[in-house]
Amino acid sequence: MVSMASSTETSKWLTLSVTLALATVSTSAAVSVYYWSKRRTQDSVDKLIKELQKSLKESLEKCAAERQGRIRAQQDLRKAMLQAKTENLETIYPMATIAIIRSCFSTRNGTPRQPLIVPLARALLTFDTSRVPPSSLEGLEEYSHCWIIYVFHLNTDLEKLWKHPSRSKLKAKVRVPRLKGEKKGLFATRSPHRPCPIGLTVAKVESIQGNSILLSGVDLVNGTPVLDVKPYLPYCDSIKEAIVPNWVKMDDMLAVGSVDFSDDFLATLTRYWPAMVKKSLYKSPEEFKSLIKQVLSWDIRSVSQRIQDEEEEESSTNESHDTIYHVNLEGFDVTYRITLNGNVLVEDITLVLLT
């Protein structure tokens, strides 16, 4: 019995020992598997990070290369666009009308030859909002004047400019009104007939109205296409030491003696005014009459007309020319005569067009 009990006890200890051994081995194996798995996971993360860094580097290099390629392509495109496209090596630039002028001057006749000499001459410069957002005008109201770059769209010789230079017959010299028809080199004058029919003028900024600028002192005809507007800067745009020829200084050459109106002129204008009050750039018939006086204070006749009239003066004994002149302002046809002593008599006004 004692022997059997001893054998049983021994068997239990053996079983316990084996169990503990197996547990130890299992624990050790589990720990090893854990650390191996953890290490493998870390290795995978490190590998993934390296792959992502490599991919990012390659992407950045690719983007940089593409950017350089795009820049080179843009440069090549600009170069190609600016290269001669015709046999006369004509260069084409991307320009378009950004605004249109609504002026008190319905036609070229009567439009001042220079800016600011008719202070009441008004115009509304309205931008094309598809090209120029209204916010582009923010801050312009802080300036008193602005430059306007525009196109001489009513030149009668525009079709010549589309021809080859050898066939365009551009006039190198033009007649100067101040010199009674004497000719000067084109670039010594401000003639609108130029190789590139682009004009530059300055005007007073009266107010900003949405996508429009109300201007005064203009020398622009109605419908003029505008290419650009820039603020006038006195410190660099005004040159005190500037020198000009003596013939430019003779302001009185084109000034008339006086401007008078017929007795019933204002009454006639007042009768027409209700039809124009909502469309006019002027507040009253009296203000519009003042505009007419300022416009006709300068001899607006062409050089050829002046020469012809002066020749007739020599053989005439009448106090005034028989010629009746016309000037169209805001759709009003104004008729006047010029006396032999150079005075203007405004005779009548008729409403011919609502502008």
Image (tube, rainbow, N blue to C red):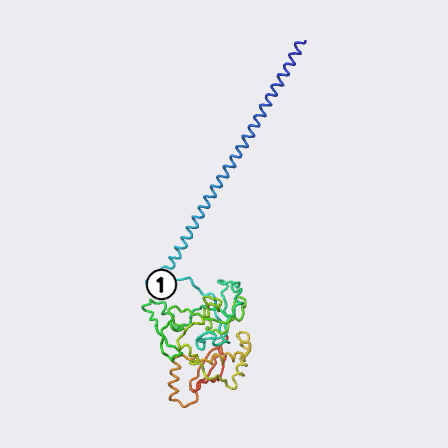
- Can you say which quadrant of the picture contains the N terminus? top right
Q: Position of residue 81 (x, y in %)?
A: 38, 58
User: In the figure, is residue 322 to the left or right of 206?
Assistant: left
Residue type highlighted by circle 1: Glu
Q: Position of residue 177 (x, y in %)?
A: 40, 78
Q: Which residue is nearer to you in this view: 215 or 288?
A: 215
Crowding at dot 1, Cα within 10 Å, few <14 / some 14-19 / many 20+, comes out as few
Examine the rendered structure and indicate whether residue 15 appears above or below residue 74: above
Which residue is located at x 33 percent, y 67 percent? Answer: 165
Q: Position of residue 188 (x, y in %)?
A: 38, 73
Residue receiving disc 1: 90
Determine the residue located farthest toward the front in the rendered image.
Answer: 241
Examine the rendered structure and indicate whether residue 29 appears above or below residue 257: above
Q: Position of residue 148 (x, y in %)?
A: 46, 68
The answer to which quarter of the image holds residue 195 is: bottom left
User: In the figure, is residue 159 to the left or right of 30?
Assistant: left
Q: Which residue is nearer to you in this view: 281 or 295?
A: 295
